Image: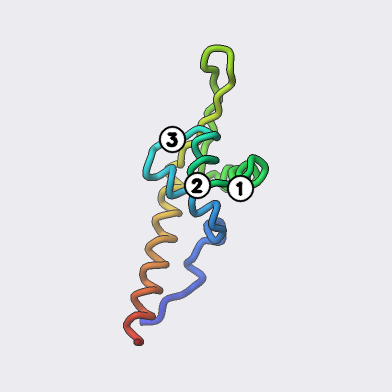
Amino acid sequence: MKVDIHTLNKAFENRVRLGIMSALIAGEDMDFNRLKEILDVTDGNLASHLKALEKEEYIAVEKSFVGRKPNTKYVATKEGKLAFMAHIDALEALIKEQAGRS
């Protein structure tokens, strides 16, 4: 069986976006600083990748205040979870196909 690489989702091809989605699916929701710490990226780098995932509607942004400080949390949407799992399934199928050839 040949795996169609077009089933891979371009939104998740970047390592930072892959990390964001992995973290959000594993941890439900996370704030900006926690994601930055986990992924070890700059503010600007993280912000641009979060914006790209938000544009695809794969994540949602929840803004609130903790005391007087603003707090921004991110959560994977239902569509984001489904798209990410489909991407992971496609990767697994590709790996299994390649392993079967060796």
**Which residue corresponds to mark 1?**
49
Mark 2 residue type = Ile
**Which residue corresponds to mark 2?**
20
Q: Which residue: 43% across, 49% down?
A: 22
Mark 3 residue type = Asp
Image colouring: rainbow
Of labels 3 and 1, earlier in sequence is: 3
Is the residue 92 above or below the residue 102 in the image?
above
Of labels 2 and 3, earlier in sequence is: 2
Q: Which quadrant holds the N terminus?
A: bottom left
Q: Which residue: 41% across, 59% down?
A: 86
Horizontal arrangement in the rendering, residue 72 relative to residue 101 (left or right): right
Instruction: Indicate the position of residue 28 as horizontal and vertical percent values.
Output: 39, 37
Mark 1 residue type = His
User: CA separation, marks 3 and 1?
Assistant: 16 Å
Of labels 1 and 2, earlier in sequence is: 2
Is the residue 86 above or below the residue 26 in the image?
below
**Which residue corresponds to mark 3?**
29
Is the residue 63 above or below the residue 27 in the image?
above
Q: Which residue: 55% across, 17% down?
A: 65
48 and 11: which is toward the camera: 48
Label 2 Cα crowd, 10 Å radius (few <14 / some 14-19 / many 20+): many
User: CA separation, marks 1 and 2?
Assistant: 8 Å
Q: Which residue: 36% across, 71% down?
A: 93
85 and 100: which is toward the camera: 100
| Tag 1 near tag 2, CB within 8 Å | yes
| Tag 3 near tag 1, CB within 8 Å | no
Horizontal arrangement in the rendering, residue 42 relative to residue 93 (left or right): right
